[in-house]
Image (tube, grey):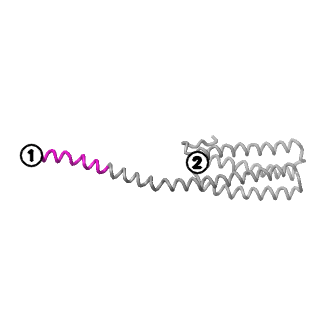
Amino acid sequence: MEPEVIAALVGVPAVLVTAAAAYAAGRAQARSAYQGPVDSVRRQHQREAYAQLLAAVSDFEKAAYAAIARHGEAGELFAMVEAEEEKYWQAERVASLEGPTQLLPSLHQVHSKVGTAVMRIHQFLFTSEGTTVDRNDTTHVLGELLDAVEQFTNAARTHLNGQGEVAGPF
């Protein structure tokens, strides 16, 4: 075979490899050009969902402490706690839909603590003697709720700031 033909044949694989690499790079660039704005919008929705969740927990906490202070009739106080609990559940559903799944363990911790707090407040208002020990036990449960909220907040911050893997509560 002629040397010119051999040189041309040797160059063909190099051209094909270069073309394939250029094609892959173009696809990656197009994908990131699309994903950048999508990720930005997704993070904004997540940020809003997390903020609503934290506001709902704060409102629940205020209602819970008002119930523990017994500033009113037990039935009315518990109805106020239940109303704030419902707002929390709605905010939690939105936050869990927004994800990511790495936040779900810390979100489930908050969920569990809210449920425990509601049960403890009910017990405090309707079945306990309202002693200092009962009040302290109920306050302790609310403290555990705030610890769980802090874990969720830290995990959400890590996720939103893109600082790597989200650490769960375990």
Disc 2 packing (10 Å; few <14; some 14–19; many ≥20): some
| Residue to which mark 2 is pinned | 160
**SS label for mark 1:** loop
Amino acid type, label 2? Leu
Task: Count the labels in the image.
Answer: 2
| Residue to which mark 1 is pinned | 2
Q: Quadrant of residue 83?
A: bottom right
Residue at x-position 57% and y-position 53%? 43
| Residue with the most extreme left position | 2
Which of 113/91 is in front?
Answer: 91
Instruction: Where is residue 56? Give x, y as percent.
Output: 72, 54
Query: Majority secondary structure of the magenta segment?
Result: helix
Which of 74/26 is in front?
Answer: 26
Asked whether 17 falls inside the magenta stretch, the response is: yes
Instruction: Where is residue 164? Give x, y as percent.
Output: 54, 42
Residue at x-position 88% and y-position 42%? 132
Asked whether 88 falls inside the magenta stretch, the response is: no
**SS label for mark 2:** helix
Amino acid type, label 1? Glu
Q: Earlier in the sequence, mark 2 or mark 1?
A: 1
Q: Which residues are magenta?
A: 1-20
Instruction: Where is residue 64? Give x, y as percent.
Output: 80, 51
The disc at residue 32 is none
